[in-house]
Each structure stands twice: as structure tokens, then as C-alpha cells.
Amino acid sequence: MELLLACRGAWDTPDRSGDPVDLHDHGLQTAALLRRSHPFDKELQVAGLVHDLGHLIVPGDDAGHAEHAAQAVRPLLGERVAHLVRLHVPAKRYLAAVEPDRALSPQSALTLRAQGGLMGEAEVRAFAADPHAQAAVTLRQADDAGKVVGLDAGVMEDWRPLLEPVAARAYGRTP
């Protein structure tokens, strides 16, 4: 929770030239969209909440932010949440390759090149074969939509009752 709360006033780019909302609001919006579209997939919702923590952990590393976030959340939230977090950048590359007319936010379009650009055919096939590919695409779509200035998506503390049982289940403990 401390790391999530530290996202208030932290941005995806150190100079604030990136997305129009801070990491705090972006995480809340992404998670809220996932809660609405996938109400029974609590791990997906949590992945939406934490997916961009890498921007806070290593500011300015657009190419590596998903991996930094995945490494940070794996010990607390488990393998599936970490895997979805890690896949949200490849999901962008995948969607950009298979849906070339799909719009990206200006910042997302800018960072696509640093993150490897469009996937090639072999990468598309490999990504699609991942058992978590569809959930990662869903996370990516919510990620792209969760950048609305002024949208009230609740408060971070509202997510504590979901974070605790996801963490407990990740390690076989009773929530």
C-alpha cells in the first residue's frame, strides 16, 4: 500500500511530459475498468492497479518498467499478477501489430519504439500462445483507457480488501 500511495504525484515520465494523469490515478482508473469488465478476476484487477509501479521504482525506464513492476509485486501478489504486469508491454506491441489502426495515447506511441516496436509474426504467435495472453490484452486495453483527467475512480484504500486476499491466495494462505 505504501508504494501504491507513493504514486500520487508521480508520473510515467520524470518531466511530466507523458500521460495526463499521475500513476496513482492511472492505476485506480485501470483497476476500476477491469473490475467493471471482469468482476470475478480479482488478480487481473490487482494487476491493473499495480502494472505501472516500475515507473516509480526506476523513473525514466520505459522499456523496463513492466519488468521492474513484475519483480516488485511477485513476492507479494504472486506469479499470475506478476506475469500479467510483465506482459502489459508485450500486449501493447502485440495489439499494435495485429490492430494497426488502433490508436495509442501520444506517450504510449512514443514509447512503443523503446519497448521493441511492433511484434513480428513469430513474436505475435508466441505471445498469442501464452495462456495469459488474453488477460494481458484486456489489461492493456484498460491501461490505454485509464488516462482520463479528473475521472473519480475511488481511493487507493478501497483496494486494500482486494489486495490482502489476492496476496494470501498467492501463497496458499486463507484470506
Image: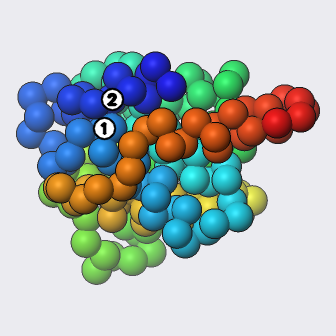
Q: Which residue is mark 1?
A: 23
- Quadrant for residue 150, please give it: bottom left
Q: Please tell me whether residue 75 is drawn above or below residue 43 in the rendered image.
A: above
Could you tell me residue 140's position as x and y percent?
45, 59
Mark 1 element type = helix
Q: Are marks 2 and 1 in contact (CB under 8 Å)?
A: yes
Could you tell me residue 20's position as x and y percent?
15, 49
Quadrant showing the C terminus: top right
**Left or right of residue 104, residue 99 in this image:** right
* Precedes in sequence: disc 2 or disc 1: 2
- Quadrant for residue 152, please give it: bottom left
Closest to the observer: 26 or 1?
1
Identify the amino acid type marked 2: Cys
Q: Residue at x 52, y 62 (%)?
A: 34
**Residue 141 in sight from this viewpoint:** yes
What label sits on residue 7 in the rendered view?
Answer: 2
Closest to the observer: 113 or 8?
8
**Dot 1 crowding, Cα within 10 Å, few <14, some 14–19, many 20+:** many
Q: Please tell me whether residue 128 is drawn above or below residue 25 in the rendered image.
A: below
**Residue 121 in sight from this viewpoint:** no
Q: How many numbered tags mark residues here?
A: 2
Could you tell me residue 122's position as x and y percent?
58, 61
